[in-house]
Image (cartoon, grey):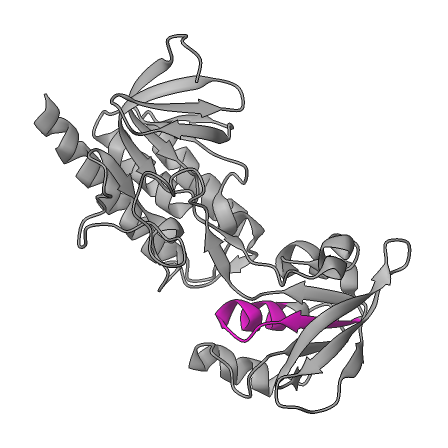
Amino acid sequence: MTDSTPQHHRLIILGSGPAGLTAALYSARANLEPLVLEGAQPGGQLTITTDVENYPGFPEGIMGPELVDIMRQQSQRFGSIHRYEVAEEVVLETRPYRIRTDTAEYSCDALIIATGATAKQIGLESEAELMGYGVSACATCDGFFFRDKEVAIVGGGDTAMEEAIFLTRFASKVTVVHRRDELRASKILQDRALANDKIEFAWNRQVVEILGNKKDGVSGARLESTVGEEEVTLPCEGVFIAIGHRPNTELFAEVLTTNEVGYLVVDEPTTRTAREGVFAAGDVMDPSYRQAVTAAGSGCKAALDAERWLELQE
């Protein structure tokens, strides 16, 4: 941090997914004029989601980016301030708390962390090499490019099944590669995937190499058996990674309490973290549900917690 005087706000919200934007709405209506630092992916994971069918109030569903825009407009109506900046350093050892972004410095009395989570990767050299050249972590972003092609998707949870089903709109065949012999996804998504004629399953298999090059794209994937069977090569022109998420807590890991996999720990049923005046909401503190509606609910709680805490400081 520099010694220059940072711009001060009573409340700053880091993140602009459903948690951050709901927190912005509630705190703006409480006349706190929150500053929302939208981060590297404004709107969070909803912006890479097409049809959102399970958010209350939209019986016909709504596109993820459209839902984010509506939330942002609603909070701005009541006075929230939004900046498309990325927090690079957060100082929580002394108050007021200080935040340095890629373009400016700020200070605040209270902070709501709603930085969300990021999709995990397998960790293969070939995966990193071909990311964007046939390998993707977002079916809703890139599925269109695989019309009438055969693709693979890695994973066995809700995200993998949602993306596999989505990819059947474009691909001629989708092979789900899962290291176990049963899925972890919710029953309704399992039923949909298993009943889809375009979806096949490579059980007890894991990807050990993605074949191809940047010029020609992906040509296949080498699949190793987890139960001692022979290695096989799966012909495909795209590989989508859907093996879960990691919370975006790098900036806070040394000063706030996290669980064994990095999610921020809060004092349930509140959103209070281990630091006075610092609250957490959404996927950054929720390893269990990770839904837009639960994120929004925790954003509401964080705003109310912050408002009440600020009142006690006056």
Give percent across and percent down for residue 9: 30, 20
Q: Quadrant of the C terminus?
A: top left
User: Residue at image x 43%, y 39%?
Assistant: 16
**128 relative position to 112: left or right:** right
Q: Position of residue 70 (x, y in %)?
A: 44, 41
Res. 84 in view:
yes
Magenta residues span 150-166
Task: Say if residue 168 shows up in the picture.
Answer: no
- Number of numbered discs overlaid on the protein picture: 0
Q: Is residue 259 above or below residue 68?
A: below
* Magenta-drawn stretch contains 278: no
In the image, residue 77 above or below residue 251: above
Please give the name of the residue rendered at 35% of the width and 39% of the height, measured from the top-left corner: 113
Q: Quadrant of the N terminus?
A: top left
In depth, the one of 55 and 302 nearer the eye is 302
Toward which corner of the image does residue 294 lie, by quadrant? bottom left
Which residue is at a point 48% across and 17% down the rendered structure image?
A: 104
Magenta includes 163? yes
